[in-house]
Amino acid sequence: MSRLYDNQPLQSVPVENQTWKGEWNPEVHSGPGVLLDGVLHGRSRHVITDTNQKKSRYVVLHVKPTVAHRRKFDSRGIEIEPNFSDTQKVSKGHLMSSYKTEAKGKSDRLSTPEVISTVSKQDLSSLTSKHNRDGCVALWAREEQLDKIELENGDTIRLKTTADCPFIFSIAKLDTVTSQVSNYAGGETVGSSWTDKVMSMKAQDAPEPQDTGGAEDDEWDD
């Protein structure tokens, strides 16, 4: 049975009006950004008014990361799969009867302190500091980004940030029973290109043997 979207939980969050000194331009940040899973622990709503009287509406999600990786791009600027682990399993011998572990390169995985350090900006953090929760990172979503996604505290979500900053590029709600994306909003379709792996939780803990003679760990669930 389908469920109609109800934004009542969001509407119950009070709006905070704040003045920004200078021009509000969240696109000035650089860096690859972060891809993370986490649990939503709280929300706050903000209307930012800059010196040009431009108003921007945001919902700040206070998320406790469970697993995170740095986003990765090739030389053409196309996003590719991060290195989820610094090792991988490869088959050895005949009939793929055994495996060995070998170096794969530096992992793109980030600890929670590294995530917070990467995306937090002092001028933005000062606007949301009173809502801070221990071990959580404050991530900014435009109100329209959440128009078609219903979020409540305790939900498990998966998101990407735009550059090394707290602004959200895309966000998906995860069904913790089936480990599948159950609701999505953002700049691309779930499952496009390499996001078949990144934006979908695998159903098994280990990959099935492949005819190519190699196999990898399911690093996302490490």
Image: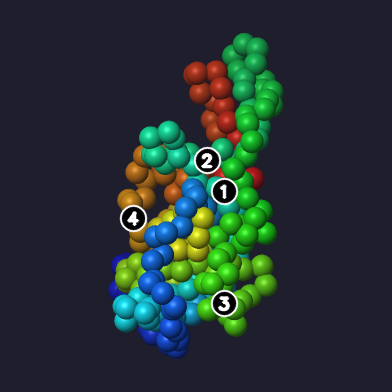
Q: Earlier in the sequence, mark 1 or mark 4?
A: 1
Question: Residue 137: where, in percent of width, then height?
Answer: 58, 67
- Residue that mark 3 sits on: 126
Q: Residue at x 32, y 71 (%)?
A: 144
- Residue that mark 2 sits on: 82
- Residue that mark 4 sits on: 187
Q: Nearer the viewer, residue 171 or 95?
A: 171
- Residue that mark 1 sits on: 69
Q: CA distance from mark 3 to mark 2?
A: 31 Å
Q: Is residue 25 left or right of residue 40?
A: left
Q: CA distance from mark 2 to mark 1?
A: 7 Å
Q: Earlier in the sequence, mark 4 or mark 3?
A: 3
Above or below for 121 versus 216: below
Q: Is residue 206 left or right of residue 113?
A: left
Question: Residue 157: where, in percent of width, then height?
Answer: 49, 62
Q: CA distance from mark 1 to mark 3?
A: 25 Å
Say what amino acid the circle numbered 2 marks.
Answer: Pro
Q: Pointers 2 and 1 in contact (CB under 8 A)? A: yes
Say what amino acid the circle numbered 1 marks.
Answer: His
Q: Earlier in the sequence, mark 3 or mark 2?
A: 2
